[in-house]
Image (spheres, rainbow, N blue to C red):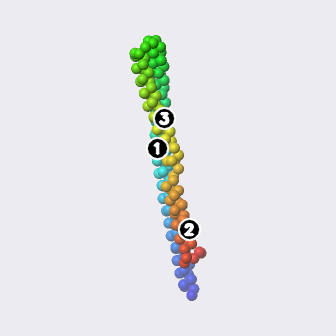
Amino acid sequence: MPGETERTTEGTASLLSEVAAGLGRLVKGEMMLAKAEAVEGAKAAVGGLVKIAVAALLALVALNVLAGAAVAALAEAGLGAGWAALLVGLVLIGIAAGLALAGKAALTLRGLWPDRAMRGVRRDAEAVRSALSEEGVRHV
């Protein structure tokens, strides 16, 4: 029957068109997710860089205070204002070290690669692959 063959061909073409459109929407959605993950990772990296910059600034101040403390300690040769400055300098160095470690931790590659998007793409590809290989599906 020629009419039945034409309807089957039209139905197949329509189905392929719908599949192509669905795949296009799927890829677009995965790309949007990847972009959102990249932006999130970049924000985390900027936060880490700011912490490192603050740590460097505090370290410079601490070195200045420690140098003043060493001079005052040598000048007085006893307990007094110099030891107080030394204590303040050591506390600032501790804060700077903590900020530097926090900044380094924020710069890990954990947020720079779009892991969720990649898992979604793999899952989608597997779903399409399994749907095409199911029994009863004919390859055109």
Viewer-closest of 133 and 7: 133
Distance Cα–Cα, label 3 vs label 1: 17 Å
Which residue is drawn at the image coordinates 51% and 52% (left, top)? 114
Q: Which callout, 3 or 1, points to the residue nearer the camera?
A: 3
Where does residue 112 sit, x and y in percent of width and height? 52, 47
Mark whose residue sits in front, 3 or 2: 3
Which residue shows up at 42% across the image and 19% down it? 83
x%, y% of residue 66? Answer: 47, 21
Which of discs 2 and 1 lies nearer the camera? The answer is 2
Label 2 amino acid? Arg
Q: State which quarter of the image contains the C terminus.
A: bottom right
Q: Which residue corresponds to mark 2?
A: 129
Q: Earlier in the sequence, mark 3 or mark 2?
A: 3
Residue that badge 3 annotates: 100
Disc 1 crowd, CA 10 A, few/some/many (<14, 14-19, 20+): some
Give the residue type that dot 1 points to.
Answer: Lys
Residue 49, position in %: x, y? 49, 37
Name the foreground residue: 73 vs 110. Answer: 73
CB atoms of marks 2 and 1 within 8 Å? no
Q: Is residue 92 above or below residue 74?
A: below
Q: Secondary structure at mark 2?
A: helix
Q: Residue furthest front?
A: 78
On the question of residue 27 being in view, the answer is no
